[in-house]
Image: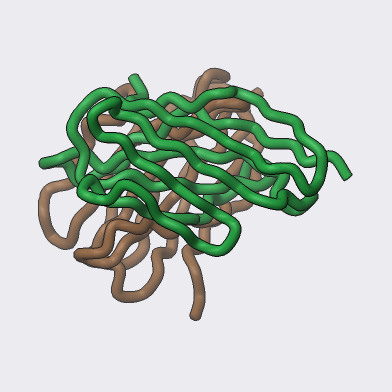
Chain colours: A green, B brown
Amino acid sequence: SQQGEEDPQALSIQEGENATMNCSYKTSINNLQWYRQNSGRGLVHLILIRSNEREKHSGRLRVTLDTSKKSSSLLITASRAADTASYFCATDRQGAQKLVFGQGTRLTINP
Amino acid sequence: GAGVSQSPSNKVTEKGKDVELRCDPISGHTALYWYRQRLGQGLEFLIYFQGNSAPDKSGLPSDRFSAERTGESVSTLTIQRTQQEDSAVYLCASRRQGPETQYFGPGTRLLVL
């Protein structure tokens, strides 16, 4: 079963608003990554946060990690129509070499 | 530089036929992964290759699925006697040794009729 679980499953907002997606996981991790997928094809890496980090920024993206709650959030500020996509969190568990992906959040930005 | 490529982009086959999917990783990437993604779902890990080590096959759903990789180059995923439930997008990703980021190919969309 997938370790990461995103919520909400779907999110629809107006262009210019901020979008927040959450991810929960179950076991200890080395790092947590967020990926974007357009049109059901290849995933694009967005940002990686390590287990000893609490917050990270990249452009309009802000990721937080709370290892005590085993959760992470991805915030996209000033959303654009081009941000419409599915967003997945993936955890890199300690001792493992493979990522475990969640089910994803489908984000729709309405112009 | 060139990214991860996969072929074919789309494959339609009849139930019971064998299919072979190909992945060309980024040059120099020692790790290669195969995932399956059913419609509207997340990614299911299938198999992982790291250099010349024995592959991690723990995600293969049945013995109809197999994969090969020669050295640090091309990989092929073979599905024998395809079933309708095999219909999905099959994604390949590669990674350099060390950094954790995976680089994904565009996927092969498989439809089994």
Query: Which of the 4 image quarters holds residue B59?
Result: top left
* In this rendering, position of residue A87 left or right of residue B60: right
* In this rendering, position of residue A92 left or right of residue B2: left
* In this rendering, position of residue B1 left or right of residue A95: right
**Residue A52 visible at all:** yes
Image coordinates of residue A69 in percent, x first then y, are 29, 25
Q: Nearer the viewer, residue B66 or B34?
A: B34
Image coordinates of residue B80 in percent, x first then y, are 41, 31
- Does residue A63 lie above or below A89 as drawn? below
- The quadrant of the rendering that contains the C terminus of chain B is top right
Count how many numbered circles sit on residues in the image: 0
Query: Which of the 4 image quarters holds residue A105?
Result: top right
User: Given the current orientation, which residue lies at the most extreme right position?
Assistant: A111
- Does residue A92 lie above or below B22 as drawn? above
**Residue B11 visible at all:** no
Query: Which of the 4 image quarters holds residue B74?
Result: bottom left
Q: Nearer the viewer, residue A105 or B109?
A: A105
Image coordinates of residue A2 in percent, x first then y, are 36, 24
* In this rendering, position of residue B49 left or right of residue A5: left
Residue at 47 percent of width and 64 percent of height: B4
Q: Nearer the viewer, residue A11 or B96?
A: A11
Residue at 66 percent of width and 25 percent of height: A10
Image coordinates of residue B38 in percent, x first then y, are 55, 27
Residue at 38 percent of width and 44 percent of height: B34
- Does residue A101 lie above or below B72 as drawn? above
Residue at 63 percent of width and 51 percent of height: B9
